[in-house]
Image (tube, rainbow, N blue to C red):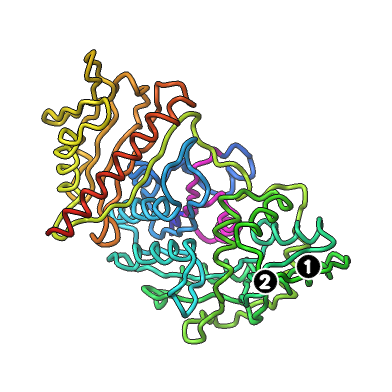
Amino acid sequence: MRVAIAGASGFIGKALIAELKRTYSVVGLSRSQHNHVEEQSSCEWRNCDLFSLLDAEKALEGAEVAIYLVHSMRPSAHLSQGSFEDFDLIVADNFLRAAKKNNVKKIIYVGGLIPEDTKNLSKHLQSRREVEEVFLKSEIPTTILRAALILGANGSSFQIMTRLVQRLPVMICPQWTSTPSQPIAVDDVLASIKYCLETPETNDKVYDLGGPDVISYRDMMLKVADILGVKRILIEIPFLTPHLSGLWVRLVSGAPKDLVNPLIESLKNRLTVRPSHRLEIPGHQFMGIDQALKLAMERYNSHKKPHAFKAPQSARHEVRSVQRMPLPKGWTAKDVAQEYMAYLPVMKPGFMKVEVKDRWVYFSNRFPYIRLLVLEYSPDRSWGSRELFYVRGGLFSKKSGRGRLEFREVLNGTACIAAIHDFRPRLPWYFYKVTQAYVHLWVMKQFARHLARGQKLG
């Protein structure tokens, strides 16, 4: 059986390849280039940018099962406009569309543990739940595995916790460090994925993953200190905000803001396993917290930077801008794209003139007349629920071949996303960021308001 793993270069992905390669034909999907001999020989690597539907379709060719380990909290371009929730959504939607085209038989998604009370979910957990919805509402059999903190030597949460303990003899602990959680060892996550891969009865089910112990982040840090043989003083201060605590965690651990802040926000929620949804594997016993921490510490290398801490590989001076918009009742992405083309000439933003002629859209300077940006509609890659325009030139754009604007339906037709990908501006970079980039974002926000007003008026 050929198994494709999206997010294969990450912490769980690399461990999963090592676990599955003896039994399955494994295909690792990653945006990064893999030149290391050991990594190349472990499986078939396919370079894939999941923001590109075409890339995703090629990457999943021949796959029977697709495992999804992707999150989009880190920037994916030199300039990224939009929220990580919308980035997560468009990438998951691409993955699903590509899986359908390639007749993938099953999808396994490892997401976040969702608390019983979903009223005050963090943005991070809301995004995880949206991705679940994308997969579960498709016709492809899907298994959802929800996990809280995954304990492993190269995991970002374990690395952050261990670095804090190593570097701070006295720690001021905000209230979120006392929230109960149910961590799980990475080896148990791998066993769970493999079990679901081999067990058809897990299709279209949602499972909670967790070890036998419920523990707070604060108590975990004390256990890490015991393993390291150091004494640490932890002082709890209830009024320290997530923003301030995120700042000191970043300064001490070296973890990036885009990773730390969403994780800290999630720790306000109690993340424990629901007994009725616990995954039970016959003959397998999940590790307790002490065993999981000791095993992670044995494999820990303080000099090795985790994959999640590294700056994402992106082409210099490329832009990605993703905005979610309301989708009026009964409309398709094609309707939204047509409305956008009709709206622009009426709007006439700033000093620009907008002309729509057949499949071409021209953004021009009013006087003197200069074509600033040229878009071409792509009927071959558009099909009602997704409409695509390629950036073909103009004074403001370099030719990249991959620059594109798209509109697509998401979340079973309840919303629409407008996105520009791999755009390469011709303007000097810093001048572009404070001019053209803001104009584009403003236009898209105005158009979203236009759709919302139209929806409200029926």
Is 279 on the left or on the right of 328, as rendered?
A: right
Note whether 120 is above or below 399 in the view shown: below
Residue beneath disc 1 = 224
Is 111 on the left or on the right of 358, as rendered?
A: right
Q: Which residues are magenta?
A: 5-33
Q: Quadrant of the C terminus?
A: bottom left
Is 129 on the left or on the right of 342, as rendered?
A: right
Q: Determine if residue 12 is in view.
A: yes
CA neighbours of label 1 inside 10 A, class few (<14), some (14 to 19), many (20+): many
Q: Determine if residue 307 is in view.
A: no
Q: CA distance from mark 2 to mark 1?
A: 23 Å
The percent position of residue 451, horizontal first and vertical second, equals 21, 51
Sequence-wise first label, 2 or 1: 1
Residue at image x 58%, y 53%? 259
Residue at image x 15%, y 55%? 331
Q: Which mark is residue 238?
A: 2
Q: Nearer the viewer, residue 202 or 228?
A: 228
Q: Nearer the viewer, mark 2 or mark 1?
A: 2
Residue that lies at the very extreme toward the top in this rendered image: 368
Residue that lies at the very extreme toward the bottom in this rendered image: 276
The percent position of residue 423, horizontal first and vertical second, equals 38, 31
